[in-house]
Image (cartoon, rainbow, N blue to C red):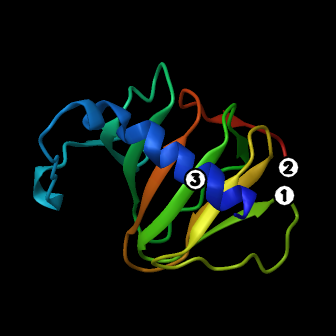
């Protein structure tokens, strides 16, 4: 198995482990998600874990046209695009690959990058981060 696919599968299993102890199936229709929006307009809907203190699994929504400043994260970030089109580009990267619905991405910890929602419509991604959330701006 490809190491990246294996890591994502293990991450998803780890995120769902508490549900395995519960005999009920958890279902969360989109309208039931509790979205919290940052002052920058990025919204998070927690699925598992507390993003401020531990590894977490969440839905993330960015407004169309959003471009982050250059930054790093202290944890690896793994995602699958649900809606819209995004890029995650290293500093100075020309013509980053556009990722759309169904696409997988991995941004390693401590890698300076810029994340952009390049579609006019919002970008929604299912995100797993193997440590607490942070966003540390860096100079280009």
User: How far apart, in angstroms, are the residues tagged by discs 2 and 3?
Assistant: 29 Å
Report the disc number at residue 15: none
Q: Position of residue 20 (x, y in %)?
A: 28, 37
Tell which tag, 2 or 3, sits nearer the viewer. 3
Q: Nearer the viewer, residue 71 or 40?
A: 71
How many angstroms separate mark 3 from mark 1 (CA)? 25 Å
- Residues under numbered marks 2 and 1 in contact, where contact means CB atoms less than 8 Å apart: yes
Looking at the image, is mark 3 or mark 1 earlier in the sequence?
3
Dot in front, 3 or 1: 3
Question: Which residue was labeled with disc 2?
Answer: 140
Q: Which residue is mark 1?
A: 91
Label 3 neighbour load within 10 Å: few <14, some 14-19, many 20+? some
Q: Nearer the viewer, residue 87 or 50?
A: 50
- The first of marks 2 and 1 along the sequence is 1
Mark 2 packing: few (<14 Cα in 10 Å), some, or many (20+)? few
* Residue 41 percent location from the top left of the image: 38, 50
Which residue occupies the foreground of this view, 51 or 25?
25
Q: Regarding mark 2 in the picture, which secondary structure is present there?
A: loop
Of 71 and 18, which appears nearest the observer?
Answer: 18
Of circles 2 and 1, which is in front?
1
| 83 vs 44: above or below | below
Indicate whether 140 appears above or below 74.
below
SS class of the residue under badge 1?
loop
Residue annotated with mark 3 = 8
């Amino acid at each position: 198995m490809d190491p990246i696919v294996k890591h994502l599968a293990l991450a998803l299993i780890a995120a769902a482990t508490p549900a395995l102890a519960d005999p009920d199936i958890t279902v969360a229709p989109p309208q039931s998600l509790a979205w919290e929006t940052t002052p920058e307009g990025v919204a998070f809907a927690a699925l598992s874990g507390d993003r401020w203190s531990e590894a977490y699994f969440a839905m993330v929504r960015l407004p169309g046209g959003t471009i982050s400043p250059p930054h790093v994260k202290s944890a690896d970030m793994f995602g699958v695009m649900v809606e819209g089109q995004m890029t995650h580009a290293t500093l100075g990267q020309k013509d980053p690959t556009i990722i759309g619905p169904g696409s997988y991405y991995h941004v390693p910890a401590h890698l300076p990058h810029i994340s952009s929602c390049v579609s006019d419509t919002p970008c929604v991604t299912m995100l797993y981060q193997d440590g607490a959330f942070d966003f540390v701006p860096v100079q280009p």
